[in-house]
Image (cartoon, helix red, strand yellow):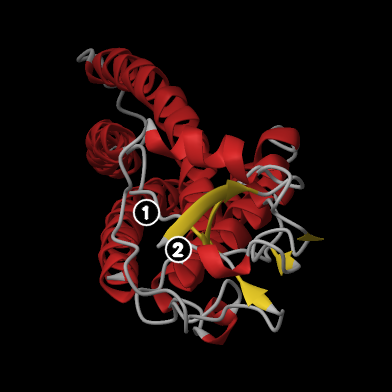
Amino acid sequence: MKDVIHCPGCNAELMLPSSANEASVQCPRCERVFTPMDSLSFAVKTAASAPPQCPSSSLDDHELLPQSTSLLVKVHPPAGQWLVHGTMLLLAATSIPLLIWAYSELEAMEMRAEIRAQVGMPIVDGRWTEHHRFTASVQSWIQMTALPALAAFMIWSVVAAHNTRSLHATGFMPWQVFIVGFFCIPGLNVLAAYVNLQDVWRASDPTEIDGPTTWRKVPASWWIRAWGVVVLSVPLQIVVAVQAASAGHHTLESYLGMSAILSVVVSNLLLIGIIRSINLRQQERYHRLCEDLA
């Protein structure tokens, strides 16, 4: 029979063999060493009021840390499933007006070519006015969807990182704090988001469940690397496009502007796949941890 206690350091729920009540134990989450006798009776009463998340029938030989008696943090299912689907939908909703904007820029390039072919002949057909009006409406659509999508992605990053700790993965920096703190600093927020995505991806691995830090052996995701490269290419393309416009190379400016828009669409699609993959990995890790405890 196992007793449920709480770590005095991090308040994590831990399962302890009843034969080890007088031994010193170590929390696998915060690595604090303590004697559970003082708080055992309160922890048992607390645990009796809530159903266990996973079976806990044979944990005597499951050692996570080299201590006299091992403890195991209870497993909780990944939270924020509605947030996963909401974030993916918002990213997809942002990609639609971006594609329309890219197509409108292609039409604008064709109109510029017609003007260059008719030098000295004024064109008064209202197409430019209509183009600018349409582009303004599309940009308003993008602003309405981009900010909620970005906010949802930031919240999902925090929740996903919290899920990894609930699934027995610890030992990485809380980069989601840096995402919020450096939200307005270009470049640094992208770096923080990239590192957080890689850590969450690796810590959600469903096979490395032998200890809280074994996820460090998992290689980085090439999909997340590709996402980072695409995101970093967007400001570079914009800078070159501005320089091309100042030098009078309007054709190059149009191509780079359209390329930057399409790069944002590609980054959104990659991010949708990454979020879905991390969610599936966390679900599988949860089920494997439950099977391991059974």
Closer to the camera, 243 or 269?
A: 269
Chain-order first, disc 2 or disc 1: 2
The amino acid type found where label 1 is placed reads Leu
Question: Secondary structure beneath disc 2?
Answer: helix
Q: Quadrant of residue 282?
A: bottom left
Closer to the camera, 137 or 127?
A: 137
Residue 278: x and y in percent read 35, 60
Q: Quadrant of residue 54?
A: bottom left
Q: Viewed as shown, does residue 120 lie left or right of 163?
A: left
Instruction: Name the residue: 24% across, 41% down.
Output: 99
Q: Quadrant of residue 118?
A: top left
Instruction: Name the residue: 59% across, 40% down.
Output: 41
Q: Is residue 34 shown to the viewer in this render? A: yes
The image's mark for residue 227 is 2
Residue 126: x and y in percent read 23, 12
Q: Is residue 186 shown to the viewer in this render? A: no
Q: Viewed as shown, does residue 34 lie left or right of 207?
A: right
Mark 2 burial class by Cα count in 10 Å: few <14, some 14-19, many 20+: many
| Residue that label 1 marks | 271
Is there a contact, CB below 8 Å, between mark 2 and mark 1?
yes
